[in-house]
Image (cartoon, helix red, strand yellow):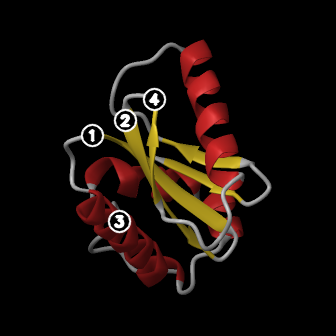
Amino acid sequence: MLLFSRHGKVRLAKWFTPHSAKESTKLTREIVTTVLSRKTKMCNILEWQDRKIVYKRYASLYFAMCIDNDDNELLTLEIIHRYVETLDRYFGNVCELDIVFNFDKVRCASSRGRPCWVGAAAP
């Protein structure tokens, strides 16, 4: 899962398969460049190498996931949307600064599939 700004600044990179640091950097750069080069009216699903990239833009942030060819693209879009809704519920209206200054909470939510602050009072 990648969260990056429309200027290409990566805000969160969560890998679910092991990659070396060099390979992760290269893959991240390729994915960000590929997504940012697409026009806004184009489909949010694209074939890339032997996989698919599914992405969605919310305000100034892109949320992207790389999935296998046999995975469900619409379900992946729904997962991205639910993740954004979870962040919205916690931060009010999540923005890039929330992710920058509350990186630990955002990363924790991406690891667990649910917010780490459940049961805790929101700010």
First in sequence, mark 1 or 4: give its number.
4
Report the Cα–Cα distance between label 2 and label 4: 6 Å
Q: Nearer the viewer, mark 2 or mark 3?
A: 2
Please provide percent x and percent y for residue 74: 27, 65
Please provide percent x and percent y for residue 33: 69, 42
Query: Left or right: 114 with respect to 14?
Result: left
**Does residue 114 appear anywhere in the picture?**
no
- The answer to the question of whether label 2 and label 4 lie on touching residues, with beta carbons closer than 8 A, is yes
Residue under numbered circle 2:
51
Is 113 located above or below residue 23 in the figure? below
Numbered disc 4: secondary structure:
loop
Residue 115, which numbered label? none
Residue under numbered circle 1:
69
Report the Cα–Cα distance between label 2 and label 1: 5 Å
Numbered disc 3: secondary structure:
helix
| Residue type at tag 2 | Arg
Report the Cα–Cα distance between label 1 and label 4: 10 Å
Is 9 located above or below residue 96 in the figure? above
**Does residue 120 appear anywhere in the picture?**
yes
Query: Left or right: 56 with respect to 16?
Result: right
Residue under numbered circle 3:
77
Query: Left or right: 74 with respect to 62?
Result: left
Numbered disc 1: secondary structure:
loop
Instruction: State the residue at coordinates (35%, 65%).
Output: 77
